Amino acid sequence: MRKRDFLATEDLGAEKFAAILELAARVKRGEVQGGLERKILAAAFMDPSLRTRTSMEAAMFLHGGHMIVLEPGKGSWSWETERGVVMEGTAVEHLIETSRVLARYADAIGVRVFPKGTEWVRERQDRVIKDFAAYSDKPVINLESARRHPCQGLADAMTLQEKLGNPKGKRFVLTWAWHPKPLPTAVPASAAIAAAQLGMEVVIARPEGYDLDPDDMAVIYQQAAAAGGRVTLANNMSDATVGADAVYVKSWGSLQYYGRPDEEKAHRAGLRDWRMTMAGTKATKAGKGIVMHCLPVRRNVEIDDAVLDGPNSVVVDQAENRLHVQRAMLLDLIGAK
Amino acid sequence: MRKRDFLATEDLGAEKFAAILELAARVKRGEVQGGLERKILAAAFMDPSLRTRTSMEAAMFLHGGHMIVLEPGKGSWSWETERGVVMEGTAVEHLIETSRVLARYADAIGVRVFPKGTEWVRERQDRVIKDFAAYSDKPVINLESARRHPCQGLADAMTLQEKLGNPKGKRFVLTWAWHPKPLPTAVPASAAIAAAQLGMEVVIARPEGYDLDPDDMAVIYQQAAAAGGRVTLANNMSDATVGADAVYVKSWGSLQYYGRPDEEKAHRAGLRDWRMTMAGTKATKAGKGIVMHCLPVRRNVEIDDAVLDGPNSVVVDQAENRLHVQRAMLLDLIGAK
Amino acid sequence: MRKRDFLATEDLGAEKFAAILELAARVKRGEVQGGLERKILAAAFMDPSLRTRTSMEAAMFLHGGHMIVLEPGKGSWSWETERGVVMEGTAVEHLIETSRVLARYADAIGVRVFPKGTEWVRERQDRVIKDFAAYSDKPVINLESARRHPCQGLADAMTLQEKLGNPKGKRFVLTWAWHPKPLPTAVPASAAIAAAQLGMEVVIARPEGYDLDPDDMAVIYQQAAAAGGRVTLANNMSDATVGADAVYVKSWGSLQYYGRPDEEKAHRAGLRDWRMTMAGTKATKAGKGIVMHCLPVRRNVEIDDAVLDGPNSVVVDQAENRLHVQRAMLLDLIGAK
């Protein structure tokens, strides 16, 4: 049997997606003990992490396993990823060896590798995570790559189920927000895909120039169609949030200006009113729509204090659910059967 | 019931302070197994650590638990701690979110955060550790803050009990020592408080300009009064150590010159004879007074080689006791009841 | 009984060397469970590590123990190692205290400390690892020092046994390869010693100026003599590999030009043909000689893609065996008896 990876929630298929969320709910209720005894997850963090790192290490430990944290080069040293290259430069090891070797020590390999912000046409290929999966004969887990953050997507889906009951047909608004830096699109793409997989009415509100990658949009449309939901686009944050069951606030950088930070910044300058306020929150369905964010969040820049500290915010529950969905995913992927 | 934190030994009260030391002695004798199964301590180190890191991770493991080590930003990235601020600067996450989220993943949160050496009037508020305690609904453990190092204080107390029998009424001399840099006052304050809690005769010897914070002095006086001990000040290291049962050698920076390193350095320049020598050691009670230091120690700067490698030094036992008091404190704070 | 350390495979003696390899084979077959319950290895990495770090942490966990990873100063801060020095400089702690204290927290201490590349006459003394062993009263494990990498040596020996059956008398060629940087000699010395301990016919092929340290050569000759093997030198990579049962490709810096990187680089410039190619591989015994490397390897610089991805390469098995020999070594050194 071919080994499985966990690179994107849409790869799971509807049945497995639902099954993991169900298992996560059982895990959260304390109904599942053990299952990862003597199992090792080798997790390579090329980029900083608080939640992913802590929740993944906790997940392994709580079921009897262990996570080994690797921080190659603390960001400065990069694996060689090109095939056939004469390795005379700064990279001291090819990803081929790293993946093959870690697969001998561990039962699964986690990889976090952000895009570098220079050339989207290359970075959108998500080569590092895919090569790890190709060269490792153990499951590879995406801890956030250039294109996907599936652990976050699962946690988002679990939170939607918990807070909204059956989310099917309910209004999920993913809205862009202003931020001082152009952030990756992995989280917004993954959140919209997860909501689509739940059959929700997905609304994506973003300013001109902030469309998600067309391939990501295609996945969102496909998943919505398959799950009986639908997708619409909006150009205005405050209009879009009206009547929403859930508002997912998130900033991301313009792919149109990708790799040209000065132009991107100039374009972004007029968009500071894309900020989740108490007024926007009150405009949600019956004033009770939930406000989501993957964290870290910049207070009073992306979301106001009053919203984050008020009853609509579910951002901490969402972060907690990272732990539970990951426990379920790990049990499914490498747990004792 | 309100959750408890472990921020300072004086917060414990006399009974709990004694009980933890008693439990630590039992732990050291190998009489206590388990008790932290499936428990997680998330420990955030904003500053370097050898003993605290190793002994705390060992403590969790030895009783079946696990410590997750976080090093936010490796020193360069700092949490936002101000309320209500518009987060447009370098801080990417507010401490509010960090504390709330870690409390969902872990059974306790450890925080090490040193003062920055710029503005004592602000830093003496010890905001970061207190805010963590305020926003986390799980116990917060002080792994050394601007004002306190209670794990060290407990280890000091345990060592005094082991080496001196009942320390009550015995002469404990905390003496300043010269050092090339102005160090924080958390350790000397915590050591003097712990000695006061044991009812010892506490002598604090320091040069002009090196008084501890007045609030810390007030705590030392209060604890001594409550425990039947007393506190005196001395201006001279060699006089103070005469007849001492225990000499605690420690350098710290002048609060008077706080944030003005050049002036502090000039003031400090004439004080190189504040160094623990063999002569000073022989002047202790019957020449058998114990010499203590929290480590790391600068050899032949704070304490001479001959003293550190001789029979009076208990610095390694003191370091070992970090492990045992922390096992006791953790069992008390988050252990299975 | 004097505590044992694990600093070099030649210190083990023939019987213990064989016994650990036998235990490693049993461990690999899954015949040995547990044995390190409640045991702690404190591993201090002064230099980067992927395989050593991961395989050692995995080894401890798989038998019920735990490894605590320490990265003192992330490379920038160094322990004071001189005796009697007045510690006014940058070093904040003497290695004496570090070793003594870690020995109180852990059942064994691992240390990785590379040579600095400045002064071989000093660095060849391998002071740091030896001082750790001297001051710690718990076993010290060499995770690669200036002179030895015994965990690698054991893994090399295990791989030779696995792939060649009884390696005695078989042709083991250690060959220098070109590399953009002058690397340490710990690995080639340790590999040749291990092959000598197996009684192999050891051939060391290196260009002029690349002799190993004379003391290391003496150990290789002694071990070969004791085990019934022999040692010869060669000046040419392609001649030496002819008929080889095993070719161990490895680059190292010239000790003759040690500390003079520009001269070393100029000298090295003409040696780029010291590279393991498919032709060299086909020239091995019946074209089936195994190709070894400790990793990380620079593809198409030290060894060609076709060789690394072909059937002769055993580099990934070799890396895997790090795990098994370390499990055996740890069980032998600190395991429950």
Image (cartoon, coloured by chain):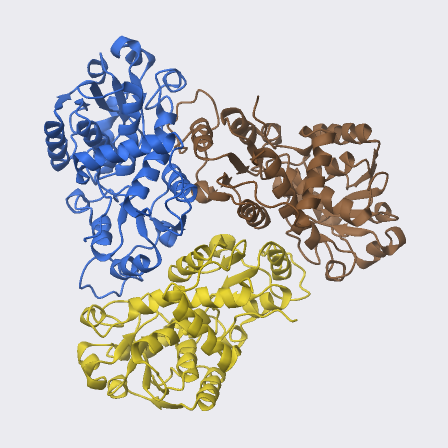
Chain colours: A brown, B yellow, C blue
Residue B273 lies left or right of residue C232; in this view the side is right
Q: Is residue B287 visible?
A: yes
Q: Is residue B244 above or below residue C287?
A: below
- Seen at 37% across and 46% down, the residue is C36
Circle count: 0
Nearer to us in this view, B134 or A330: A330
Query: Dividing the picture into quarters, in which one does residue B178 lie?
Result: bottom left
Q: Quadrant of residue C319?
A: top left
The spot of residue C17 in percent (x, y) is 22, 35
Residue C182 can be seen, yes or no = no
Work out whether C205 lies above or below C149: above
Name the residue: 66% across, 36% down.
A257
Quick check: C94 above or below B209? above
Image spot of residue B278 (x, y percent) = 18, 77
Residue C288 falls left or right of residue B53: left
Residue B44 drawn above or below residue C335: below
Q: Position of residue B220 (x, y in %)?
A: 45, 85
Residue A2, x across and y down, in percent: 57, 22
